[in-house]
Amino acid sequence: MMSYSRRSRYSRSPSPYRRESSSYSRSRSLSRDVENPGNNLYVTGLSPRITKKELEKHFASEGKVIDVHLVVDPWTRESRGFGFVTMAAVEEANRCIKYLDRSVLEGRVITVEKFLWQQVSCVWQLFAKLQKSYN
């Protein structure tokens, strides 16, 4: 008799239901600090109607934007209200934090802060809640 879990046995994705051991996450956090030199920004308070182009244009006023990742609902394709912006240089990212934090975009006040890897756990929790609500 086989036991069935929520995860497909063929999935290579990590389970949002399984917690990592503290030693594993501790070792990962050291390498992740190296991956983020300070030019990755976490943006919250976004309108559901915002697009990647509009977000990029807003941040381009403070420097060169390398990448914009807008987190969207997989079914409706609307923004989930937060995203990530990567600037070309740390100085440009700092200017974005200084001048764009608490700015208004599409009628909403947005917050801009340096991306911290601890925020990944919040994203995973949101993902798990969304999966439960659609199942």
Image (tube, grey):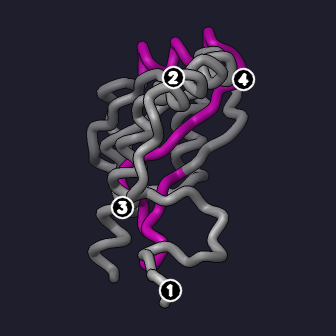
The three-letter amino acid code for the residue at tag 1 is: Met
3 vs 1, front mark: 1
Q: Residues within 10 Å of mark 1 (few under 14, many from 20)?
A: few
Dot 1 or dot 2: first in sequence order is 1
Evaluate whether residue 39 shows in this view: no
N-term mark: 3 or 1? 1
Q: Which mark is residue 26?
A: 2
Q: Which mark is residue 32?
A: none
Neighbourhood count class around disc 2 (C-alpha, 10 Å): few under 14, some 14–19, many 20 upward: few
Q: Quick one: SS at disc 3?
A: helix
- Mark 3 closeness class: few <14, some 14–19, many ≥20 residues within 10 Å: some
- The residue under label 4 is 88
Which residue is rendered at x = 39% and y = 58% of the image?
Answer: 17
Residue marked by disc 1: 2
Work out how far the residue at label 4 is from the one at label 2, CA to CA, in angstroms: 28 Å
Which is closer to the viewer, label 3 or label 2?
2
Secondary structure state at the residue bearing disc 2: helix
